[in-house]
Amino acid sequence: MSDTSTPATDRRRWITLVVVGLAQLMVVLDATVVNIALPSAQADLGFSDGQRQWVITAYSLAFASLLLLGGRLSDLIGRKRTFVIGLIGFAVASALGGAAGSFELLVAARALQGMFGALLAPTALAVLTTTFTVPKERARAFGVFGAIAGAGGAVGLLLGGVLTETLDWRWNLYINVFIAAFALVGALVFIPRVTRTGPRPRLDVPGTLLVSGALFGLVFGFSNAETGGWDAP
């Protein structure tokens, strides 16, 4: 493949990396960018200090508990389709959270963000794996992808401060709509649709429920260990 690839094919692959990197940046960014906006959101919506943690926890719980299911769904319905669904859903959930007029709606939007983020993250890795088949190029692509994931947290803290200070706390959520729009156009144009070969994979429903429930319990326990104590059931 490396010997017969054309410049157009090479360009398409690296643009795909940019698209996938944008999606990954959005998912990682959202885990931290809202932290800076929490005091402003609390003052605006009037929720308590005890409730504030749920704005973060709702995202983490949905993301972590549905991550394995998201990866399985990308095998079932196709990577490109799953990627597009994840981008659209994440953008809609972000817009809903930015426009939230109550604490309950904000938490629900954050949970939806985590759910669609769980679709995006494993699908992005799968797209990279199928796009870069040459070992040297794949290593370079995953290096860039890992750097984006690692820097996303720090960028989120800086960006969150800038958006909250210059605009409004709601723009910490609205910014995802613009990132998702660019990534969506790139996904529709540059990510190829891979034709499935072999039998269609099946979804193990009992196993999925068991694993998702276990991950939910694990993340919920860690999220509440500080307030409830490590010995709390």
Image (cartoon, rainbow, N blue to C red):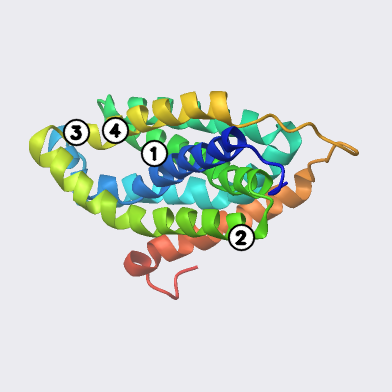
- Going by the numbered disc 2, the residue's amino acid type is Lys
Badge 4 or badge 2: first in the primary sequence? 2
Mark 3 sits on what residue? 45
Mark 2 sits on what residue? 136
Is residue 12 visible in the rendered structure shown here?
A: yes
Q: Secondary structure at mark 4?
A: helix
Q: Secondary structure at mark 2?
A: helix
Write down the quadrant of residue 175 in the picture.
top left
- Going by the numbered disc 4, the residue's amino acid type is Ile
Mark 4 sits on what residue? 175
**Classed neighbour count for the residue bearing mark 1: other residues with Cα under 10 Å, few (<14), some (14–19), many (≥20):** many
Q: Secondary structure at mark 3?
A: helix
Frontmost residue, 196 versus 68: 196
- How many marks on residues? 4
Mark 2 and mark 3 in contact? Answer it, CB < 8 Å.
no
Badge 2 or badge 3: first in the primary sequence? 3
Residue 77, horizontal then vertical, whole percent = 72, 31
Q: Give the alpha-carbon distance from disc 4 to disc 1, as whole Å.
A: 14 Å
Badge 2 or badge 1: first in the primary sequence? 1
Residue 155, horizontal then vertical, whole percent = 27, 52
Badge 3 or badge 4: first in the primary sequence? 3
- Going by the numbered disc 3, the residue's amino acid type is Leu
Q: Secondary structure at mark 1?
A: helix
